[in-house]
Image (cartoon, rainbow, N blue to C red):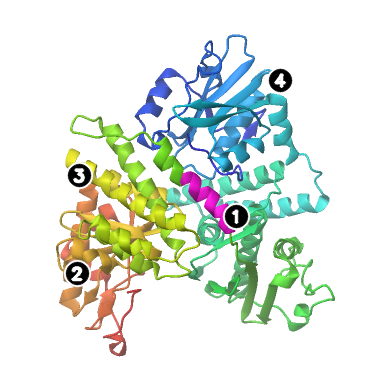
Amino acid sequence: MSFPAMGCRLNCMQDRGNYEAIQNMNPKIEERVIRNPLLNIDTFVIPSPFIHNPAVQKDYSHSYVWVEEGEILGYMLVYSDQAGEEFLIYKIVTSPFGRGRGIGTSFIEHLARNIPREASVYIYIWERQADTVEFFRNKGFEPDSSIAYRKLVYHRLVSCCGAILTKSAEGLNRSLAPEEISKTRHDARKVARLINSMVEALGTENSDTIVESINRESTTLINILNSFRDSMKIIHEVDLLELIFERIVPYVQGSTVRCELRLDLDTGAPTIQGYHVNIGRAMVNLVSNALDTIEESGRKGIIDIVMREKGDFLILTIADNGTGMPEELLVKDSRGYPRFVGRTTKGRKTGEGIGTQQIYAAFGPENIEVNSIMGQGTSWTIRFAKHTETVSTWFVRMNRRYNEFKDLWEVAMVGPRTPRREVVAYIWQVRKIEIFLFDLILRFSRYHNIRDIYRSILAYLQGVTREADLEREIAGYKSDTEKYNFWLLDISREIRRRMNILKDSVDMDSYWASLFRSYGQAYRNVIIFTADPETGNFLATDRKLAEHLDFVPYLGKPRDSLLRGEFLGDLNVEEKPIQFGVWSISSRSDALNKLRLIRQGARTFLRKGIHPEKRLSFYHTTYISGGFDIDINKSSTFGDFARLEDAELETFIIGREEEMSGYLMGRE
């Protein structure tokens, strides 16, 4: 079983107690679930559904799947008795690409709305899944009894639909202040105005782009209104990088104002504590106001978003080259509020000043600094306290994950006759362990260079060093607890063992797509890889742990015959690019040869299973010695780039100033 973290219901639409994405399960859909490897990664040992009540039966009318754009992102399998008095949540699973959306919460609430009010609902949870027990207790469940099943102890948690709905309503029934209604109207009007501008710009030559943008902004409008209706006020972790790329970048790109967005987001810890809806709304207000002033200035706009770490804080700066504000409006009152707060900052005087009120309410006046020069632009600097988990909180979560790997997963043995879907699930399981390894290595960063640690483990995983050598090295690492050292060695052994089983049992080349795509479940990690453009062979890891060069010795070719690359998140999302790059370019002809190498890599990746419409973008070359480079401001799709002739490749070459030749340009 896998359970989602508590969080916002971002993609569900409530209508008389139902959610749009939720559908009833039936035997045909259940067969699809069984065949979907992403819904069978967590093959845990769980108690038999008949252990408490032998008379229960599979109940399709109260079992659900979560479907978005035809893809099943989660399911809940329920058993019930004939009288409809007891309902067992037997399995509740979320795909790696559906995590964090509140799918599990929605399933539970939907079940509670569709069973008799006096009926009981129960579930069995392994005793070491402390955070999962806490999740269900927050949903109205209470521990009832415990059982031993296959040498493991499980707690039986019980609730009734009344208790579940009461817990659900606690965050929904707070009174709606007039200013909250004003904020929602204000935000909705901004999006509606943008949609209206898109409608006015609609023509035969741009219909595809405009309609897609209207659909996206319509979804944003629906989410704003749903968030208002749900009135969520729960403090949780907010990833600022994710917020910028999911809300701000599409908002600017969809605007009709001519504007260049420049991002400089140099931080390895973008997580803060706060209200996701309010922070997102405030950042959209900042950018919306910037676009308004840029439009008023009549010149091509530039919006710079810069994020830096400074001690225990994240510093976010949003600057524009719009009309600016007069100096007298920047004077602060005794509470720290400038005079422009609560009044429009637009020269046209059509705003209500609600946006600036919401910005200061979201971030606090003590965390905001505004600088503005009339006729030149405005800069907002916002300070956030970094979110730092306590060792105990992190340890509980990691301990649960480790024990799932060791005690709950059935040891899947694959072989030549193993069905393909089971092999795919096995691959995703191995990757899940590997992602755990990434997180674990980071815990040693206080005392050691984590890249040195990763290089040692990589050498072991590639069969270069012996287990005894790794064991001796890990024993010498300093850490917060000896358990980290034990886990590091044990998980490294497990990954090597499972990968050896896989290599000995199946044709690895025929599973290239699963081996590559499975890294996408680390949706918060930027994954770097080094690949052979001819064969597609690759090695990959979290960007914080290695450089592309670390993989070169294990791929059997010189550096300049290989490609550097990176990606973030689900590879099925075609708009998120895979980046390709090379290490060195010595001349214009060498630049063309390196572009041919990238073209060969694109063709190989297509043959292996990457979608033709997947975006392809480019790195700065690491070392330039001849005055030429690949134009990183251009991008393509894998399908289009693979079809380019040499003459068309030439258009991706740009000249560099001579004084820049011979300098390192990339990260490495």
Give the amino acid at mark 1: Glu
The residues bearing labels 1 and 2 have C-alpha atoms spaced at a distance of 40 Å
Q: Residue 230: which quarter of the image?
A: top right
Q: Are marks 1 and 2 in contact (CB under 8 Å)?
A: no
**SS of the residue under disc 4:** loop
The residue identified by callout 2 is: 559
The residues bearing labels 2 and 4 have C-alpha atoms spaced at a distance of 66 Å
Q: Nearer the viewer, mark 3 or mark 2?
A: 3
The residues bearing labels 1 and 4 have C-alpha atoms spaced at a distance of 34 Å
Mark 2 crowdedness (10 Å alpha carbons): few <14, some 14-19, many ≥20: some
Range of residues picked out in magenta? 390-401
**Nearer to the camera, 93 or 296:** 93
**SS of the residue under disc 1:** strand
Residue 117, numbered label: 4
Indicate whether 322 appears above or below 467. below
Give the amino acid at mark 4: Arg
The disc, 2 or 4, on the residue closer to the chain's N-terminal end is 4
The residue identified by callout 1 is: 237
